[in-house]
Amino acid sequence: MTYEYKAMDEDGSTRRTGIYGPETILDLYGCDCKKFTRKSIRRFVKELCKLIDMERQDLHFHETEGTKNENGRTIPHTKRLSAVQFILTSSIVIHCVPLLGNCYINVFSCKEFESGKVKQFAWDWFGAATCRRHDIVRI
């Protein structure tokens, strides 16, 4: 793939210089929730970065107990473990939602990578029943 993107000059005009980079979006359903731990996710991003030849930077986690609805019940998709693995060329973002058994992953980089490898690796790692992949090109 040839990367092309538009850059804005100081006068407000744009020029075509190439595509910025690919983003792969994965929605994994019916996952093995035992994989929704900091230890597992730390290993996942480390091995994924090796697989797609990305240089890891900082890794940050965020956990939330979720928000409650008017009946005092936790809204399922708001209780989650999230992680951002910064890579030299952008980031990998993961949201694990144990109450739904789902995992949502975004891999974005200005460096090329094989999205099919990302999908298969994540699908296998989290033991998902199904996985949807969306590939887009960021301009």
Image (cartoon, rainbow, N blue to C red):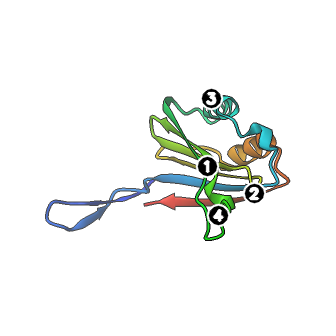
Check disc 4: other Cα within 10 Å, few if <14, some if 14-19, many if 20+: few
Q: CA distance from mark 3 to mark 4?
A: 38 Å
- Identify the amino acid type marked 4: Gly
Check disc 2: other Cα within 10 Å, few if <14, some if 14-19, many if 20+: some
- Dot 1 or dot 4: first in sequence order is 1
Check disc 3: other Cα within 10 Å, few if <14, some if 14-19, many if 20+: some
> As drawn, which residue projects farthest toward the bottom?
70
Instruction: Give the numbered dot on residue 100.
Output: 2
Q: Is residue 55 visible?
A: yes
Q: Which residue is mark 1?
A: 65
Depth check: 34 or 109 in front?
A: 34
Q: Which residue is mark 4?
A: 72
- Identify the amino acid type marked 2: Leu
Q: CA distance from mark 2 to mark 4?
A: 18 Å
- Identify the amino acid type marked 1: Glu
Q: Which tag is nearer the camera, tag 1 or tag 2? A: 1
Q: Which tag is nearer the camera, tag 1 or tag 4? A: 4
Q: Residue at x 81, y 42 (%)?
A: 124
> As drawn, which residue projects farthest toward the left?
11
Q: CA distance from mark 2 to mark 3?
A: 25 Å
User: In terms of secondary structure, where does tag 3 sit?
Assistant: helix
